[in-house]
Image (cartoon, rainbow, N blue to C red):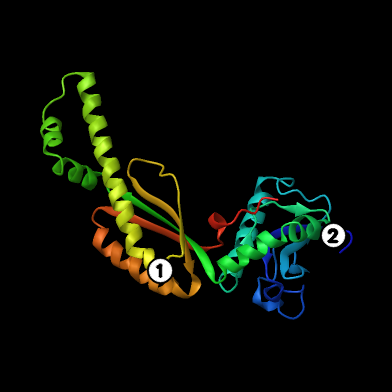
């Protein structure tokens, strides 16, 4: 469409991309972002294709207000999540728009051809899972105290000074960090045979033992779920496991242009 801009969801192989409403389009969600929602289609260049929706030339992700932006964010995520259920895609973050097909091909597919083709080869058949493990506070503090007799003795006595209370708190925090490292390694080792790659994230509280993005073969998801279920049954009394996915492999590609 010569009078439209191109909103981009991601990059995949041309054989996996629909050509508008024609042959192959049924593999993908019929509609994407916009109001009314636009058709999802592929724009090919050699062995790469951009998955796009045509939008008005003046389209801006935040231009129509917060409600419209949230609607389009949901549509963006829905397109990607449906695609990765069966195909490999390199995902763009929400809000990437190019003025026309020519500029998209030049700046995305042609300029980044070798890099994106390499990513597709490396990530073929994979999805991302995010795994978080968070301690049950009362239980883990009991473990920390029980595992450190000297600390247990100090914690059991009234702390009369502010400095003494701070010292006990620092010692508990240090012991908890050691436990976090040990438990994180143990959890990862339990699923490691089913994981291609790992990206560790920054934990956001003292009670979070693990935050990680896992690259898993789509074909291994059922086996991964069983392994995680076994871990949950063993650890449920002391920590909560939260696993989100399958997701596009955001953590394992750099889609900057």
Residue hosting label 1:
194
- Residue 253 location, quadrant: bottom right
Q: From the viewer's perspective, is 252 left or right of 19?
A: left
Instruction: State the residue in front, 69 or 6.
Output: 6
At x 83% / y 53%, what residue is drawn?
99
Question: Distance from label 1 to label 2 (Cα)?
Answer: 41 Å
Relative height, residue 204 to residue 157 (above, below): below
Q: Secondary structure at mark 1?
A: helix
170 w.r.t. 59: above or below: above
Pick whichever, 64 or 80, lies toward us. 80
Q: Quadrant of residue 1?
A: bottom right
Residue 74, percent from left and from top = 61, 57
Residue 89 seen in the current view: no
Report whether residue 148 is seen: yes
Indicate the position of residue 162 as horizontal and vertical percent values: 23, 19
Q: Secondary structure at mark 2?
A: helix
Q: Position of residue 166 (x, y in %)?
A: 25, 25
Q: Which residue is mark 2?
A: 102
Mark closest to the chain's N terminus, 1 or 2: 2
């Amino acid at each position: 469409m010569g009078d439209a801009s191109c909103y981009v969801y991601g990059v995949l192989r041309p054989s996996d991309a629909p050509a508008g409403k024609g042959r192959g389009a049924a593999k993908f969600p019929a509609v994407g972002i916009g109001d009314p929602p636009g058709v999802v289609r592929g724009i090919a260049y050699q062995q790469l294709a951009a998955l796009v929706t045509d939008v008005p030339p003046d389209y801006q992700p935040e231009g129509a207000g917060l409600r419209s932006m949230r609607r389009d964010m949901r549509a963006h995520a829905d397109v990607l999540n449906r695609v990765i259920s069966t195909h490999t895609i390199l995902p763009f973050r929400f809000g990437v728009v190019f003025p026309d097909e020519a500029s998209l091909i030049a700046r995305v597919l042609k300029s980044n051809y070798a890099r994106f083709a390499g990513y597709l080869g490396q990530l073929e058949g994979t999805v991302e899972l995010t795994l978080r493990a968070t301690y049950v506070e009362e239980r883990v503090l009991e473990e920390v105290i029980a595992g450190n007799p000297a600390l247990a003795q100090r914690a059991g006595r009234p702390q009369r000074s502010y400095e003494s209370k701070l010292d006990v708190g620092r010692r508990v925090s240090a012991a908890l960090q050691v436990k976090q490292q040990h438990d994180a390694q143990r959890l990862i080792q339990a699923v490691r045979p089913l994981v291609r790659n790992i990206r560790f994230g920054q934990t956001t509280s003292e009670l979070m033992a693990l935050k990680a993005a896992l690259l898993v073969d789509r074909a291994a998801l059922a086996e991964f779920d069983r392994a995680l279920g076994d871990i949950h049954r063993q650890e449920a009394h002391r920590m909560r496991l939260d696993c989100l996915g399958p997701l596009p492999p955001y953590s394992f590609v750099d889609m900057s242009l």
